[in-house]
Amino acid sequence: MGQLAEWREQKWVRIGTDGSIKGPCGTSKDKKNPDRCLPSRKAYSLSKEERAETAKKKKVAAKKGQTVVPNTPKAKVKLKNGGEVRRIARGCGKVMSNRRKKTKYS
């Protein structure tokens, strides 16, 4: 099973800066500075303080202009095969080859 398929199987939830689980990932009202998302299994395995720590880290870094903020060490998400979750879709071409940008030469 590929990483994208494995990611889709997990139910990701949104974590607030107070450490509470706010609902499904992608439902944040603040589109400029969204909340941290984690797989529900990982989120429930962390304490409320640990969830708050990783969510605050993302909010603070996003205010400084960072778009990709790694999790805290305890909140790092591991895959079944032992690897770590990375940004899979760096560009559309990697996931959807039929969506690659085509350049015309004259």
Image (cartoon, rainbow, N blue to C red):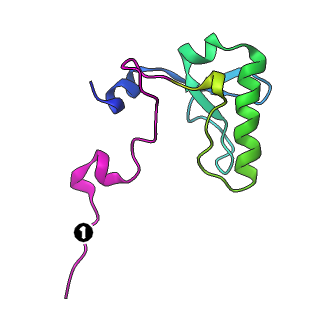
Quadrant showing the N terminus: top left
Q: Name the residue under label 1.
A: 102
Residue 2, compared with residue 87, is above or below; it is: above
Residue 70: percent from left, percent from top: 61, 38
Instruction: Please give the name of the residue rendered at 76% of the width and 35% of the height, measured from the top-left corner.
Output: 56
Horizontal side, residue 30 vs residue 42: left or right = right
Q: In this view, does 103 lie to the left or right of 36?
A: left
* Relative height, residue 52 to residue 98 (above, below): above
Does the magenta run of residues contain 53? no
Residue 79, quarter of picture: top left
Q: What's drawn in magenta, residue-wise?
A: 78-106
Q: In this view, does 82 lie to the left or right of 94?
A: right
Query: Which quadrant, please, contains the C terminus?
Result: bottom left
Q: Is residue 101 left or right of residue 15?
A: left
Q: Position of residue 86 (x, y in %)?
A: 46, 37
Q: Is 99 covered by the magenta stretch?
A: yes
Q: Which SS type dominates the magenta stretch?
A: loop
